[in-house]
Image (tube, rainbow, N blue to C red):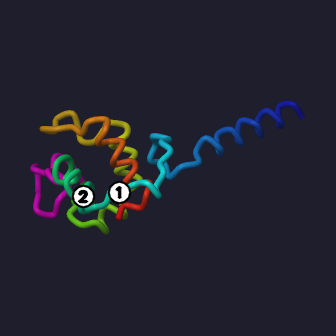
Amino acid sequence: MIRTSLLALALCSLLTACGDDGGGGGNTVDCAQSTLTYDNFGSQFMDSYCLGCHSTSVSGGARGGAPVAVNFDELTQIQTQKGRIKARVNAKTMPPATANASPSQAEIDDLVEWIDCGVN
C-alpha cells in the first residue's frame, strides 16, 4: 500500500512538472502586453541566428547538419517548429557553438515571449 502510494505520488509529481509545451524556460509572459511580432522581431531573429543553416536556399554541407525539412524561411514553418525552437534556444544548443553569432539572454527572453504569445 505504501509502495503504491509513493509510486502514485511520484507519477503525479512528474506529470505536473511537465505542464508547458516542452519548450522549457518556465517564463511567465503577459501576452496582452507583448508587442513582439514576426515583422518587428521574429524575422530578424531568424535571419540573424537560424537561416544560415535552416533555409531552403542553403544546401548540402552549408546547412551545418540541419535537417533538410527543417527550415524557417516562412512564418508557417516557424509556427510548426515553435516548441522545438524554444527548447533548443533556451537550452543554448541552437544556434550551435560553431555558429558565427549567438543571441543574448534578452533576445532569448524575447523569443520565448514571442513564441508563448502565438508566433504571429
Q: Quadrant of the N terminus?
A: top right
Residue named by callout 2: 40
From what the image shows, is residue 78 above or below residue 22?
below
Seen in the image, is 60 located left or right of residue 118? Answer: left
Q: Residues within 10 Å of mark 1 (few under 14, many from 20)?
A: few
- The mark nearer the N terminus, 2 or 1, is 1
Residue 35: numbered disc: 1
Amino acid type at image mark 2? Asn
Q: Residue at 36% across / 58% down in the picture?
A: 81
Question: Which range of residues does the magenta coloring cover?
Answer: 51-66
Of residues 69 and 39, the one drawn nearer to the viewer in this rendering: 39
Q: Is residue 10 above or below residue 63?
A: above
Seen in the image, is 23 located left or right of residue 76? right
| Residue 41 image offset from top left, x and y in percent | 26, 54
Is 62 part of what is drawn in magenta? yes
Tell whether label 1 touches label 2 (CB within 8 Å). Answer: yes
Farthest right residue?
A: 1
